[in-house]
Image (tube, rainbow, N blue to C red):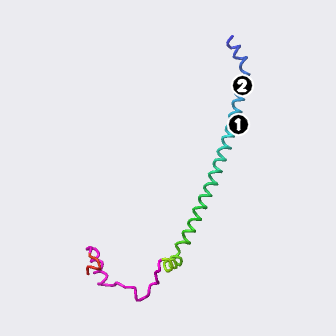
Amino acid sequence: MSSENFKQLKPFFSILLVIFTLFSIVFLQMEERRMGYSVLKLTREHKKVWEEKRTKEIALAKITRPQLLDSMAQQKFTLKKVQANQIIHLSGQLASDMNSVSEKGITKKDL
């Protein structure tokens, strides 16, 4: 009698298996779509952050360009351009003497 019950339940189990398989396929497709939206959102966010980084790099380059720094130093901090006679060139023995003096911890004032 048990084998006869099993034969009667075979169509039910096969239909149950088909329904379970179809639900699994639908679930996997929904999961794939959800993951696709997540990837799309992250891609947009990445582009936004990359564009913001690029904008900040351009702004930094504009702020730190030498002409702007020079004009700001002259206007805000009242610094003047260096004249040729203000530059001290150290060469030869004098430069090596100054290096050895600075290594010993002696400053120019001490000389």
Q: Quadrant of residue 100?
A: bottom left
Q: Secondary structure at mark 1?
A: helix
Is residue 40 placed above or below 30 in the rendered structure?
Answer: below
Residue marked by disc 1: 26
Residue 84 colored magenta?
yes
Q: Amino acid at mark 1?
A: Val
Quadrant (top left/top right/bottom left/bottom right) for the N terminus: top right
Residue shown at 72% from the left, 29% from the top: 19
Q: Residue type at mark 2: give it.
A: Ser
Q: Is residue 73 above or below residue 3?
A: below
Judging depth in this view, the residue of 99 and 16 nearest the camera is 99
Residue at left offset 64%, top offset 54%: 44
Q: As displayed, is residue 109 above or below residue 21?
A: below
Real-space CA distance between mark 2 and mark 1, rounded to the nearest whole angstrom: 18 Å
**Residue 11 belongs to the span the image colors magenta:** no
Q: Is residue 58 left or right of residue 16?
A: left
Choose the circle earlier in sequence order: 2 or 1.
Answer: 2
Q: Is residue 13 left or right of residue 109?
A: right
Residue farthest to the bottom?
A: 85
Residue corresponding to mark 2: 14
Image x and y of residue 87, in percent: 39, 85
Magenta stretch in the rendered image: 77-105
